[in-house]
Every structure is written in C-alpha cells, then in structure tokens.
Image (cartoon, rainbow, N blue to C red):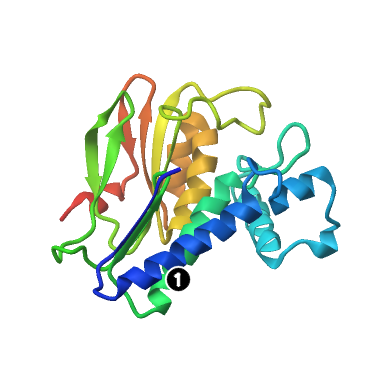
Amino acid sequence: MPITVDVCDASGGAIVGIVFDYFEQVDRRFSTYRTDSEIAAINRGDIPVREWSAEMLEVLALAKQTKDETQGYFDIRKADGSLDPSGIVKGWAIRNAAGIVLGAGISDFFIEAGGDIQASGKNAFRKDWSVGIRNPFKPDEIIKVVYPRGHGVATSGTYVRGQHIYNPHGIGSSIQDIISLTVIGADVLEADRFATAAFAMGRDGIFFLEQTPGLEGYVVDINGRATPTSGFGVFCEQ
C-alpha cells in the first residue's frame, strides 16, 4: 500500500528514512503475504508462544481488547483458525511511527498509510492539516474535508479492495448495506481498530460510534446516503 510521510522540518530527511525503515520491520513481522514473516510462521505452527516477539504479543493483546470492546465484531482469527492482525497493525504501526517523529523533536508532520492518518501540528503553509473523504462511488471526488488537529483518522470500506471485511457473527456474510466508514479517534490506532469493527457492524456501526466516548464517524451507505455522528461536524470546521 502507498505510504506518505510529510515532515515540516528542515532536518526531517533523516527521520523520514528512519520511519520507512520502521515500516519495513513491521512488514517483515506482520505481513500475511510473506512466507518469511513472524505471523506466517506462527500460523504454520513453527514458533512456540514463548518465542513470539514482544511486538506480536502487544498487537495480539490489542486485538483481544478490541474484540472485547466491540462485542466480538473485531476478530483477527479467520474461519480457518489462522491469525490475521491486518485490521489493527496498520494503525498501531502509524502511531508508533508518529512517536518516532515526535521523539526527534518534530511536532509538525503527517503520516498516512492505506487511508489511515496521524497528523500533528501544522502543514508547510502553517495551516491545519486537512483530510479528504472520498466519494466511494466516484473516488476522484472529495465529499467531505476534515481537520484532525492531532487526532487519528481511519477509513474502512469496500469500494477499493472489494469485500474484505466480514461480520464475525455471520461467517462468510459480506457487508452489503454500507460502503464507506470513516472514524476519528484520539490517535490513529484508536481510529483504525474501531473503524474495522464498526464497518463489520454494517448500518449499526454508526450508532456504536455515536455511543462510544472519544470516537466520531461518518458512514456512506449503499444508496449514497451519508450519516455522521453528532460530534463529527466539529472536525469539519476550519
């Protein structure tokens, strides 16, 4: 997936390289598309639990926490019994990458990977970072602009990758009633983990976000109707 790192600092070149090195490490550990990744070895039964990395245990613990907090709508265990942490590891990695940049004393930056975003401070024009939500029926068109102001933004949907999110309570049943769901959370990890779960809930996902403190959302259904949570509009104001 494409990754963007925009650092508004004259000395930011070095830190960008460090961030991309970190993302490469994450890919080598968590990618389900690589036969040499740690998660692939775990799914083959090649590594006993006592030898799993600290990073793997942290992500799996976050996945279990999210499953508990979403009444089971977030579940990284697939029907065949294998583990696929893709629904949470991206936001986790972006949050950690943001920590690397902040740790270098840089407060103005923007990191995006596959539609999940962490923004901090101001952009090169000394304005708030802005994030466009695509029209899922016309991906070249922006239907809403939000200003994260230090928050994280994540979008789940089927308009790019097709049906890849499923309701764990109805194995094999795809989500047909909504097509795009954007979540704003305290950071990108919070936004990412709840975006996946809320999308799996279908139409009920926006009500889950409305009732969950610290989360705002914007859903587009299959008929093109958009529904925001009550506090979402605050992030659309410059």
Residue located at (37% from left, 44% from top): 217
Vertical placement of 211 versus 14: above or below? above
**Residue 203 x/y as whole percent:** 46, 30
**Residue 192 x/y as whole percent:** 48, 50
Residue located at (58% from left, 57% from top): 26
Using the rendered image of the protein, determine whether residue 213 is visible from the camera's viewpoint: no
- Which quarter of the figure has residue 200? top right
Is residue 93 toward the left or the right of residue 127 in the image? right
Which image quarter is the N terminus in?
top left
Which image quarter is the C terminus in?
bottom left
Using the rendered image of the protein, determine whether residue 173 is visible from the camera's viewpoint: yes
Question: How many labels were placed on the picture?
Answer: 1
Q: Label 1: how many residues lie within 10 Å, few (<14), some (14-19) or many (20+)?
A: some
* Foreground residue among 101 and 227: 101
Vertical placement of 157 versus 34: above or below? above
Vertical placement of 163 versus 54: above or below? above
Given the image, on which type of amino acid does mark 1 rest?
Answer: Gly
* Foreground residue among 151 and 87: 87
Is residue 113 toward the left or the right of residue 11 in the image? right
Residue located at (49% from left, 54% from top): 91
- Which quarter of the figure has residue 77? top right
Provide the secondary structure element on which disc 1 rests.
helix
The residue labelled by disc 1 is: 99
**Residue 57 x/y as whole percent:** 71, 61
* Foreground residue among 105 and 15: 15
**Residue 199 x/y as whole percent:** 49, 36
Is residue 140 toward the left or the right of residue 85 in the image? left
